[in-house]
Image (cartoon, helix red, strand yellow):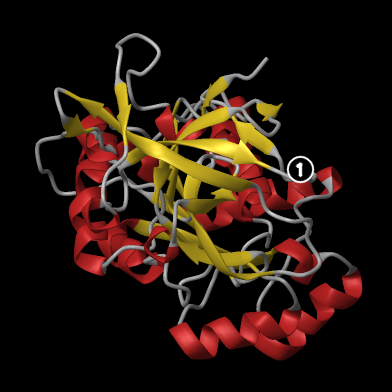
Amino acid sequence: MTQTFLASLARIADFETNPYDVRALRHEDWASGDYVQAEVAGPASELYVVESCSGAMLPVRPGDEIVGALGERAATLEGVGSYKDVRNGRMHALTAAGLFGWFTSFACTLPSPMSLVYRGHIVRDGNKVTMRQFAIRAKPSKFSIPTILLVGTSMSAGKTVTGRRVCKLLSSAGYRVVGAKLTGAGRYRDIASFKRAGANTIFDFVDVGLPSTVVPPDEFRQAIRPLLSRINDLKPDFLVAEAGASPLEPYNGDAAIDELGDTICCTILCASDPYAVVGVRQAFGITPDLVAGPAANTSAAVDLVRKLAGLPALNVIDRGTLPALRDFLERTLQLNLGEPASRLC
């Protein structure tokens, strides 16, 4: 028996409670953020799973249908693709979250990506339904929340694990924390893990109607500003903000950092190796307060980061380093994590 799955990019929509129709549209009428329905085609591989609106990973099989959204991805380690390259209705799941397009470049070390057949756009009253229709709206305000920024040299560099550790330490000390993923390709599990680690509230770019942040910079800034305004209205003590991928990739990491401006009071660079730390510093001019990720996996790596870049490094994956991370946050943010919360940054 075939099933229809709502992928996690549909979590901001109302498809579970309000009916909709599916109608095929001409390719020239497609746009990033359009909700569409596609049929799973074979042969299946390990990547034939879909991330549900709750973040659960569910297996799918040929014949099942998935509601997702058109968009683009430019992942350095996995694949590059776009809805613009779809031909004759043949598509790929660019991520398990229901980001749909066609891979033009894909890592040969991975199983075959999920193949899909376009069945049509989600429509109501003859009009297509888009992510932007469900986006957060907020009155513009100057963003002023002290921000711990997590940036990386690539995807899978340890940003999410580091963010969880920071959220846990701050929230355990009584601070009100908002966790946010400002750039990347839509997945819910990363930012949901910030909530489990103690963040009071979580957001990502999906909340403002973007399936990924591979969009023109002006479009990204226009979308992300209401999100920052909403966070500002909540008046947390800290924002723990992850910029997915790296600032030099086409995900608008540089624009996100610019929008945060001088509210950034701590920057943690998660790097794939010690030499990548030097590369990001030279290419983007970022001097982090701490290096984490694989670049700090061993004492030899930590020593090399210090030698090459003159920066401290910490293997935050090792829970034994939590006291050292706590000390680092106390020094950098000028607070005492053992005392009642107070706004110090």
- State the image quarter where residue 270 is shown: bottom right
Question: In this image, 215 relative to 100: left or right?
Answer: left
Q: Nearer the viewer, residue 13 or 160?
A: 13
Q: Residue at x 31, y 39 (%)?
A: 24
The x and y percentages for residue 79 are 61, 65
Q: Residue at x 31, y 63 (%)?
A: 215
- State the image quarter where residue 116 is shown: top right
The x and y percentages for residue 219 are 21, 59
Residue, far top: 17
Q: Nearer the viewer, residue 216 or 105?
A: 105
Residue type pointed to by label 1: Ala
The x and y percentages for residue 174 are 51, 25
Residue 198 in view? no
Q: Helix or strand or loop: what does disc 1 sit on?
A: loop
Q: Nearer the viewer, residue 286 or 170?
A: 286
Question: In this image, 77 relative to 180: left or right?
Answer: right
Residue 241 in view? yes
- Per the image, the residue denoted by label 1 is 44
The x and y percentages for residue 271 are 67, 70
Classify 9 as above or below 117: above
Question: In this image, 134 relative to 83: left or right?
Answer: left
